Image: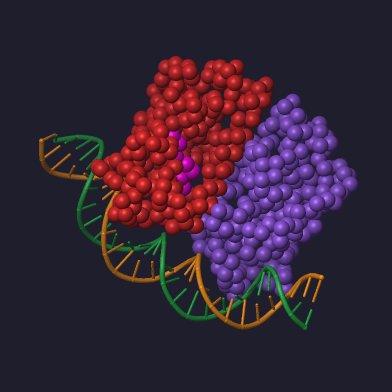
Chain colours: A red, B purple, C green, D orange
DNA sequence: CGTATGCTTGATGGTTATCAATTATGGTGG
DNA sequence: CCACCATAATTGATAACCATCAAGCATACG
């Protein structure tokens, strides 16, 4: 409850040079894939690149929701603390993901957003975005599509929540692998950017359960761990009975 | 799996006379509350009223999602059958609710929609709606707001899913009371439009658990049952420790 | 009046929350 | 470079909750 202790809000986040979306590695994931050249150019003019170091807050619940964001590199955790003290993780966002959309139709942010890594993001101001959207139907449609994507993701989690912890964790790691490893056939070793506590909050279970499930997967040879890195060995076989 | 047995799709649904939104009892809940007089008139011209009797399908998963809908009276269940055979209930929709929005950004419907009562609805064709939306920023914004509302509801369910069945059921009945009873201070007796199986699918639990929880609430005097009617006696006291 | 569907109840086992305690890890300052 | 601290991860024991299976009852509907 003592906010000042954990107050890591970045008072003056680093600002990266705007090099243009053409040079951005995330362009193939980014919202620009919805848009034609003209719209991309217009979007590019209203995007501001920023850098946050690990642990910094990007926005905070209750602040006016003036922008939404695209992750260029790194990982962002979007969460809030519930009335009963639990942490609810709305989502983890990786390179190419759009976040802050859950608050787009609200005056103020519903969640806190925190950089888990050193993270580069593109900020899009809503006021400028709405000017653009008023004249460009592609841009209009984009925002509905983005909110709709969030809806699908949350609904998927709602449906998966009846599965036992181990299966939920398999699905979580599988999705993470798809996001974090460039190509799926390549190296599947990566370090988990979030803590077991974060994963537990995301899945709605206790951190002890996450720990035990991870251990069990290692014993069964589904994953391997070397220091902080995790490697997915044969997750597909483990997932196949799940009717995904 | 034998679809024809349960094939209750209405081949030729009744069509109610369009009397205009002014005379519609749901106007205070309806999407029209977002819009000014001009936009309401325009919406009114593209809305078609239809009647479905209990058990009829309004749309079906996989069909092209040409319309979305507002409930005038009655109750609509939106659900789909998952890969493992479970029924997942996306939502129940009552007077004034908008449904079909979950499929707005898709080519085809993601779910089946079924009338649980004799139900009157307004259908809004997407093609006509998008023409309207291209020139009217209020209408544009409305669709984002509607999808965003669905997102909030689903997220609420995701968060509540860790609660035990009895608490989830309390919350469910509380929400239902707010929707089904005109004023909250008035009579809180109403008949549940959906089966215990439906409620169980909505909450992601077994129907036996729903039955036991309902019985327990009756024993504790939280609810009373007379034939098919249920009456909420003192749900607020039961809900107060839940930090809602 | 028979059948289908929904509802009810009991017994049992499995999964996870909970509480408690210990070990590892990373970062900080001396 | 090491000692120290805070945080994260681990492990064990126990109890609560719910799924599951099975069987019987109620209700509606033709």
Q: Is residue A16 magenta?
A: no
Q: Note whether residue A170 is visible.
A: no
The image quarter in which residue A104 lies: top right
Q: Is residue A92 magenta?
A: yes
Q: Please report the residue visible at 61 percent of the width from the left and 55 percent of the height from the top.
A: B81
Q: Where does residue A144 sit, x and y in percent of width and height?
A: 62, 34
Q: Where does residue A220 sit, x and y in percent of width and height?
A: 32, 54
Nearer-the-camera pick, A215 or A92: A215
The total of numbered circles placed on residues is: 0
Q: Note whether residue A244 is visible.
A: yes
Q: Please report the residue visible at 54 percent of the width from the left and 32 percent of the height from the top.
A: A65
Nearer-the-camera pick, A61 or A152: A152
Q: Please, what is the dominant secondary structure of the magenta stretch?
A: strand
Q: Please report the residue visible at 71 percent of the width from the left and 61 percent of the height from the top.
A: B5
Left or right of residue B140, residue A155 in this image: left
Left or right of residue A2, residue A215 in this image: left
- Magenta stretch? A88-94
Q: Please report the residue visible at 70 percent of the width from the left and 49 percent of the height from the top.
A: B60
């Amino acid at each position: 409850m003592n906010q000042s202790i954990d107050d890591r809000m970045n008072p003056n986040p680093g600002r990266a040079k705007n090099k243009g979306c053409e040079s951005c590695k995330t362009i193939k994931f980014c919202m620009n894939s919805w848009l034609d050249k003209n719209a991309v150019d217009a979007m590019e003019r209203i995007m501001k690149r920023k850098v946050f170091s690990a642990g910094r807050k990007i926005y905070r619940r209750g602040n006016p929701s003036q922008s939404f964001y695209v992750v260029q590199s790194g990982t962002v955790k979007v969460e809030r603390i519930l009335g009963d003290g639990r942490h609810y993780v709305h989502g983890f966002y990786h390179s190419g993901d759009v976040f802050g959309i859950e608050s787009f139709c609200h005056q103020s942010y519903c969640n806190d957003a925190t950089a888990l890594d050193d993270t580069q993001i593109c900020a899009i101001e809503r006021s400028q975005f709405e000017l653009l959207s008023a004249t460009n139907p592609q841009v209009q449609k984009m925002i509905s599509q983005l909110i709709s994507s969030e809806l699908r993701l949350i609904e998927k989690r709602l449906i998966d929540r009846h599965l036992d912890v181990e299966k939920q964790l398999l699905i979580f790691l599988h999705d993470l692998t798809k996001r974090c490893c460039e190509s799926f056939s390549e190296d599947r070793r990566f370090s988990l950017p979030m803590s077991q506590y974060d994963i537990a909050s995301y899945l709605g279970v206790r951190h002890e359960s996450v720990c035990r499930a991870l251990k069990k997967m290692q014993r069964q040879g589904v994953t391997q761990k070397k220091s902080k890195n995790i490697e997915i060995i044969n997750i597909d076989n483990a997932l196949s009975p799940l009717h995904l």
